[in-house]
Structure formats: C-alpha cells, structure tokens
C-alpha cells in the first residue's frame, strides 16, 4: 500500500503531530511503552488534564491506543500512521525527482530539434 | 525548531532561462513533463490544472492557484500537495542564469502540519526515528 495516496486519516495524523507538546507526549509514550496520563504528568510541564486531551487527539488520529489497567488507562504507540506520513513525504520528494528528470528530457529534446 | 518547512530540489538545465520559463508556464510543455495534461491561466490568482492519466503515478486531477508570475525568474502556485489530501502547499520555481544554462530551484513548502523532523527533507533520518519508535514499542 506504499504507493497509495494518503487516506483521510492522514489529515488527522498531521493535525495531531502539528503540536509540539503532543509530539513530546507521543515520544514519551513510545519510549516508556504503555503509560498513563499520571505517569506522563511527572515528565511534562503541563497539567494532567492537558495530557489527557493530547492523548485523546493522538488516539483519534490512530497514533496511540488506550487499554484500561486497573484504575487507569495505559496508552501505547501505534506506529503504522507514522509510516504512512513518512511514505507520503518520501513520495512527494521522489515525484519531484521524476518530474525534474522529465523536464530535463523535454528541454534537451527541444534543444536538438530545430526551433520553428 | 529551525528545520525548514520545505522539500527542495535543484537542477542545472542546459538551456537559457526563457526556455525553462516556457517549459514551466506554457500549458502544452507543462503538461509534457509535470502531468500528462495541463491548463494554465498565467496570472496571479489564475488557475493551473494538472491531469495525470496514471502512467507516471496515481491518476487524478490537481488544481492550483497561481501566486507569482515573474517572467524568466519566478513562478509559484499553491496546490493540494497530493491527490486526496486537502493540505495546500506552495510550489515555487526560481530560475537563475548559469554558465551551463539555467539553475532551476523547486521548493515545495507549507508542510506546517508535519513534525519538524519530517519536514527536513532527510526522509531517511525521519524513517530512522520511526524505526526507533517502533523498536521502543516492540521492546516494551
């Protein structure tokens, strides 16, 4: 599916990743393994409520998944949407490479044919 | 973070800037290398429409709005970065005379919704980070 254009979910992923605090939350979730808002609060200069909101956005974007563990919800990273984002950027770059190669060929062809 | 919000490419083309300008702004030539067909209303605010028949990537139509028309020097438009994605990025072509012909720079910018790490055109670097994230997950 790497050649497929981004699905609608990508917009939610980009929006979720646009916020620097949310990226830190995601990074911490990735580093700590399944972790709770309470544990994240100790490592971030923001309130627990803010962290819960960030986790909710990440969850809606499909970047984390929550699992109830006793009194609290533990969140874990879902890496697949990040692969999709990386694929998208790589694809845009490689499309430019292809286009510019075709542009070069076009001007070379024009150069060798007599101008009208 | 100071990472530029753009993908950038640069090529030297063995023809003068006015020839490159034509390839960028004349519908028949633009269609020949950029899409499989193009139409263009060459003025700021004018529309540029690219159509792909599927022979060089996904099939589809992408519309852009022209922002800058500075003949033989600068041409820019804003468009959907890719089919089906509503984010508008800006594509800017800058042409400069060069001993061998023309230096053409392309900058596609406006990936503001992407993390700074991704915006860096070093996609491999970002891929590494993703791999690391995945490893952390696996290890956890």
Image (cartoon, coloured by chain):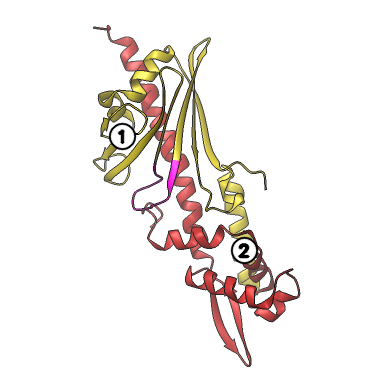
Query: In this view, which residue lies farthest toward the bottom?
Result: A70
Separation of residues labelled 1 and 2 (CA atoms): 40 Å
- At 33% from the left and 24% from the top, the residue drawn is B25
Q: Which residue is mark 1?
A: B48
Magenta-colored stretch includes residue A116: no
Q: Position of residue B79 (x, y in %)?
A: 38, 42
Q: Position of residue A98 (x, y in %)?
A: 40, 34
Nearer the camera: disc 1 or disc 2: 1
Q: Along the line of sight, which residue is nearer the eye, B103 or B63?
A: B63
Which of the image's four quarters has the C terminus of chain B? bottom right
Q: Which residue is mark 2?
A: B133
Q: Quadrant of residue A41?
A: bottom right
Q: Is residue A114 above or below residue B103?
A: above
Callout 1: helix, strand or loop? strand
Q: Position of residue B99 (x, y in %)?
A: 53, 9
- At 36% from the left and 24% from the top, the residue drawn is B24
* Earlier-in-chain disc, 1 versus 2: 1
Which is the main secondary structure of the residues drawn in magenta? loop
Magenta-colored stretch includes residue B86: yes
- At 31% from the left and 43% from the top, the residue drawn is B62
Q: Is residue B10 left or right of residue A71?
A: left
Q: Position of residue B113 (x, y in %)?
A: 52, 53
| Chain ID at mark 2 | B
Pointer 2 local density, CA inside 10 Å: few below 14, some 14–19, many at least 20: many
Chain shown yellow: that is B
Chain shown red: that is A
Label ID, residue A55: none
Callout 2: helix, strand or loop? helix
| Chain ID at mark 1 | B
Q: Are marks 1 and 2 in contact (CB under 8 Å)?
A: no
Specify start and end residues of the magenta stretch as a single range.
B79-89
């Amino acid at each position: 599916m790497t050649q497929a254009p981004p699905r609608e979910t990508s917009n939610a992923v980009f929006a979720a990743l646009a916020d620097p605090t949310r990226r830190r939350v995601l990074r911490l979730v990735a580093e700590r393994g399944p972790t709770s808002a309470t544990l994240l609060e100790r490592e971030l200069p923001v309130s627990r409520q803010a962290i819960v909101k960030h986790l909710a956005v990440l969850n809606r974007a499909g970047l984390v998944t929550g699992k109830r563990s006793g009194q609290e919800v533990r969140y874990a990273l879902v890496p697949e949407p990040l692969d999709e984002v990386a694929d998208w950027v790589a694809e845009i770059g490689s499309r430019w490479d292809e286009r510019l190669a075709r542009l070069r060929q076009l001007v070379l062809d024009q150069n060798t044919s007599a101008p009208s | 973070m100071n990472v530029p919000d753009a993908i950038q490419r640069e090529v030297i083309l063995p023809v003068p800037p006015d020839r490159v300008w034509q390839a960028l702004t004349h519908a028949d030539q633009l269609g020949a290398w950029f899409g499989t067909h193009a139409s263009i209303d060459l003025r700021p605010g004018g529309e540029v429409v690219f159509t792909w028949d599927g022979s060089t990537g996904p099939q589809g139509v992408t519309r852009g709005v022209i922002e800058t028309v500075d003949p033989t020097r600068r041409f820019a438009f804003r468009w959907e970065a890719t089919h089906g994605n509503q984010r508008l990025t800006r594509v800017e072509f800058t042409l400069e005379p060069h001993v061998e012909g023309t230096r053409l720079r392309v900058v596609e910018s406006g990936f503001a919704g992407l993390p700074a790490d991704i915006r860096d055109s070093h996609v491999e670097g970002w891929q590494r980070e993703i791999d690391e994230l995945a490893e952390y997950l696996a290890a956890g």
